[in-house]
Amino acid sequence: MNASVCALDELRAKGEAFLQDVSREYYSSHAGLKAAAELQPIYERHRDAFGDESLELALGLLGQSAPGSDEHRSGRMLVEWLIESRVGRELAPLEEREIAWEGSAMIPLADGGAEPYRRASITIANTRDAKERRALDDARAELVKCGLAPMRQERLAREKELVEKMTVAPNYLDTFDALAGISVRGLRDECQAFLRDTQPMWDDVLPEFLKRGLGITPSEATRADATALLRVPEFDQAFPALEMEARVKGQVVEMGTSPDANGRVRYDTGEREGKRARAFCAPVAIPDEVYLVLRPHGGQNDWQTLLHELGHALHFANIDSALPFEYRWLGDNSITEGYAMLFDHRMKDRGWLGRYTQLGKSDMPRYLRAAGFEELQFLRRYCAKLIYEVELYGGAVPWSALPELYVATLTSATGFKYQSADAFVDVDPHFYSARYLRAWQLQALLAETLVERFNEDWWRNPRAGPWIVQELFSQGQRELAEEQAQRVAKKSLSFAPLVKAIEGLLT
Ligand SMILES: [Zn+2]
């Protein structure tokens, strides 16, 4: 074995040990088993894993290998991860400052009271009175504008500067393209076309849902109204909490595979003080020890969340253990998000809903139409976010002009008036929104393929589960989402199947 192969294996071993420790720490603190995450000591203990030598080695692998080769693939993943880890460590104090602000900030209310910042979005969604809801959101925006927004702006600007200093490519956007293996400007163009193509459909349904859900017209609708509108408790009784886990696991068994990947997925779905409200999946060792953590709130959202996290958990727990570190732990997250969405989109699948939930035949058309509306709203919002984020990281628009651009872009795409204070807060760092958009496209193609191979009710075909495990899950994230689409569906990723699916739901 030559020296560089040996050094590369060492880099992989150190990387895996580091990520296992980080993942275990996140799991323990977010699951409420430990008061707070202590990440700094882990970074300190593993500083070698993402040190200069590791980066040079990975850059060498990327630079000296032929594009298309497995060496090049590994190099791309390792460089992307190392840069993210190094930038993350550098910006950790700024991130901690923001988390501390979010944890303690109080929104002053007109009646003299105060609302904790962290609870505001839930309160806004649950406030039925429009005036009260908008007043709370205005007070929230006022506080964010002087507190969180400048901190976020500083972190985003520093991130852009640090990434560009790595000189992988001339600027931030090209660096992202080179390391993520996609064209973010190409995706931006697709998003613009999607917004254009679905505008008539959106103009058609928005007034109807606003009137029926909230009794308001599009001209007065704000983002606060959007959150209230999408909080639909109307169908909650069809999604009983007590049956949820057994029903969903039962479906996976019917599909011919193990709902806990033969003991490798551990479900942590009970109530526990200190458990984070948002569900998550923590792969502490891939594939052998994966946690699916959920704190039940009741209703439809829990079911959707459980399905989403189950897609992640079954993916991680079924990855071939012989694959190198980077294919198991790193790579294109559009893949794992695509599997999570493949599972959570069963909540938009008439046959699945009829079999595993208590949604009655008479409620089904109304439920599916609402699901189509929600899907279109979220997709239009994410397209607008990506279009805006390309401008933010692109550097052609001065930072001072970004809030106005944010409001114009998001408002025109969604029909809800956005707040300029959120221009730096409502940003997914390093284009995670691009991963979601590709995942959305990927799950639509995967679902089409599964229907072709295993019929409309593929989710209960005992041949489908083993196929999914073998052809999708076991491969980790070796492929890019586009490569997988070509291999499995013989098609390119696009918004076309999503438009078709939404049209089907809205009719
Ligand atoms: Zn996810």
Image (spheres, grey):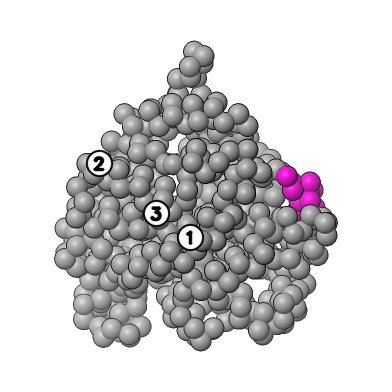
Q: Give amino acid for label 2.
A: Glu
* Quadrant location, the N terminus: bottom left
Which residue is rendered at x = 19% and y = 68% of the image? 169
Q: Nearer the viewer, mark 2 or mark 3?
A: 3
| Rendered location of residue 95, percent (x, y) | 34, 41
SS state under label 3: helix
- Residue under label 3, please give it: 385
> Could you tell which of marks 2 and 1 lies nearer the N-terminus?
2
Task: Check contact, mark 3 vs mark 1: CB within 8 A.
Answer: no
- Tell me the residue at 66%/84% (across/down): 452
Residue 242 part of the magenta segment: yes
Tell me the SS state at disc 2: helix
Instruction: Name the residue: 74% across, 75% down.
Output: 457
Q: Residues within 10 Å of mark 3 (few under 14, many from 20)?
A: many
Dot 1 corresponds to which residue? 199
Q: Using the numbered discs, state the Cα–Cα distance from disc 3 to disc 1 in whole angstroms.
A: 16 Å
Q: Position of residue 264 (x, y in %)?
A: 63, 64
Of residues 374 and 320, the one drawn nearer to the viewer in this rendering: 374
- The quadrant in which residue 173 appears is bottom left
65 within the magenta span: no
- The amino acid marked with disc number 3 is Lys
Q: Nearer the viewer, residue 177 or 189?
A: 189
Q: Compared with residue 261, is residue 28 higher up or lower down, i.e. above or below?
A: above
In this view, the mark in front (3 or 1) = 1
Foreground: disc 2 or disc 1: 1
**97 with respect to 470 (left or right):** left
Vertical comparison of 160 with 503: above or below? above
- Name which residue type carries label 1: Gln
- Which residue range is magenta in the image? 234-244
